[in-house]
Amino acid sequence: MNMLTHKNILNILIAFSLFFFGCEKDSEQNVFTIVTMNVTCPSVNAGIERVKVDNSLDGSFIRDLNTKQEYEIPTFQVGTATVRLRKGIYMISFDGKAVFSDGQRKKVRFSGYNSPMTSVTLLNDKETLNLELTVLK
């Protein structure tokens, strides 16, 4: 009976040390990624000045596939937006209104990562995504 108690105590100490040192190691690692998203629109012969995403639409999201958490998509200024996300696998899709350098204003869509099959994996401390927009009629 004493031997069983010593084994239990030893197992508890081992489990505690794994937990303690495991947590310490995780706290030193960055669990977030800074994602720079660059948008282009090849069907328009002008640069993108601004894209304001309509985050209220069901089809506009940055969704973590593991946690199902959704993040707002920031406004793109001069074709670029940056967002801080937890590292993982994401679906990204959105509709917005674009203003081009020649004054044109058009509704646009990005749907390149809109399903689990086409999702994007973001695991580095910094990531860059090049997103090609489609003009909506």
Image: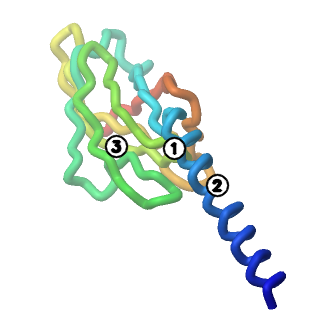
x, y (%) of residue 35? 43, 28
- At 76% from the left and 76% from the top, the residue drawn is 6
x, y (%) of residue 79? 32, 17
Q: Work out how far the residue at label 3 is from the one at label 1, CA to CA, in angstroms.
A: 10 Å
x, y (%) of residue 25? 58, 39
Residue 135 sits above or below residue 40 on the image? below
Q: Is disc 2 surrounded by few (<14), some (14 to 19) or many (20+) residues within 10 Å?
A: few
Is 99 situated left or right of 38 in this image?
Answer: left
* Outermost front residue: 2
Q: Which residue is mark 2?
A: 17
Residue 61 is labelled as: none
Q: Which residue is mark 3?
A: 94
- Mark 1 or mark 2, which is nearer to you? 2
- At 30% from the left and 58% from the top, the residue drawn is 58
Residue 110 sits above or below residue 38 on the image? below
Q: How many marks?
A: 3
Is 38 situated left or right of 81 in this image?
Answer: right
Residues under numbered marks 3 and 1 in contact, where contact means CB atoms less than 8 Å apart: no
Q: Earlier in the sequence, mark 3 or mark 1?
A: 3
SS at mark 1? Answer: strand
Q: Earlier in the sequence, mark 1 or mark 2?
A: 2
Tell me the amino acid under the disc marked 2: Ser
Q: Which residue is mark 1?
A: 113
Residue 36 sits above or below residue 19 on the image? above
Q: Earlier in the sequence, mark 3 or mark 2?
A: 2
SS at mark 3? Answer: strand
Q: Nearer the viewer, residue 67 or 3?
A: 3
- At 64% from the left and 55% from the top, the residue drawn is 17
SS at mark 2? Answer: helix
- Dividing the picture into quadrants, the one containing residue 5 is bottom right
